[in-house]
Amino acid sequence: MVAAAEDSCTARPVDAAPAYNSAPPRHGPVWKVLESVPDPEIPAVSVVDLGIVREASEGGVVLTPTYTGCPATRVIETMVRAALDEAGFVHVPVETTLSPPWTTDWITEEGRQKLRAYGIAPPMPAGRRVVECPQCGSPSTEEISRFGSTPCKALWRCRSCAEPFDLFKCH
Ligand SMILES: [Zn+2]
């Protein structure tokens, strides 16, 4: 059942290179630390899953928030700093850059799967208007409220299975 829902969400051919290929390679001990830092709004995904981390090495960590007004941004910085300190990377500086701006393409495939498993519709690629139900994959959905449980999420409902769900809308 998961496979069917996944297929209907995949706009590109299976063999095509994923859109987040431009993401930096994720190796090394600093990346490992950041993989353990959850997103404060959606603890099911890490800041690495969301593509917020642009660079991570002993030379420094660069974060790009999902959008400038996101109240979680400062929380994320604090959590990253704390995780680095705890792992012994006290000397590694953390900086935030807004350029290039974060895009939903930076969410890893693993991150998208975790969002769906958590019952949150992953953000749609730019220009795509259809929101698919994370439970059953139906494109027949409607917005109930622009603001869901947090400012980064909108509340939607599926017309097919009648389940309400959150749409991740930070961008
Ligand atoms: Zn549904």
Image (spheres, rainbow, N blue to C red):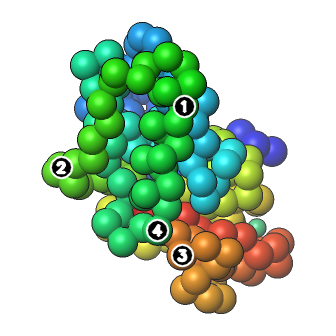
Q: Do labels 4 and 3 touch, CB within 8 Å?
A: yes
Residue topped by disc 2: 100
**Picture quadrant of residue 26:** top left
**Residue 85, how many percent across, how many down?**
49, 27
Q: Nearer the viewer, mark 2 or mark 1?
A: 1
In this picture, residue 48 sits left or right of residue 54: right
How far is mark 4 from mark 1, CA to CA? 20 Å
Is residue 129 at all visible to an observer of this figure?
yes
| Relative depth, front residue between 110 and 47 | 47
Q: Earlier in the sequence, mark 2 or mark 1?
A: 1
Quadrant location of the C terminus? bottom left
* Helix, strand or loop status at disc 4: loop
Residue topped by disc 4: 71
How far is mark 2 from mark 1, CA to CA? 25 Å
Q: Earlier in the sequence, mark 1 or mark 3?
A: 1
Residue 145 versus residue 17 in the image, above or below: below
Which label belongs to residue 151? 3
Is residue 128 at all visible to an observer of this figure?
no
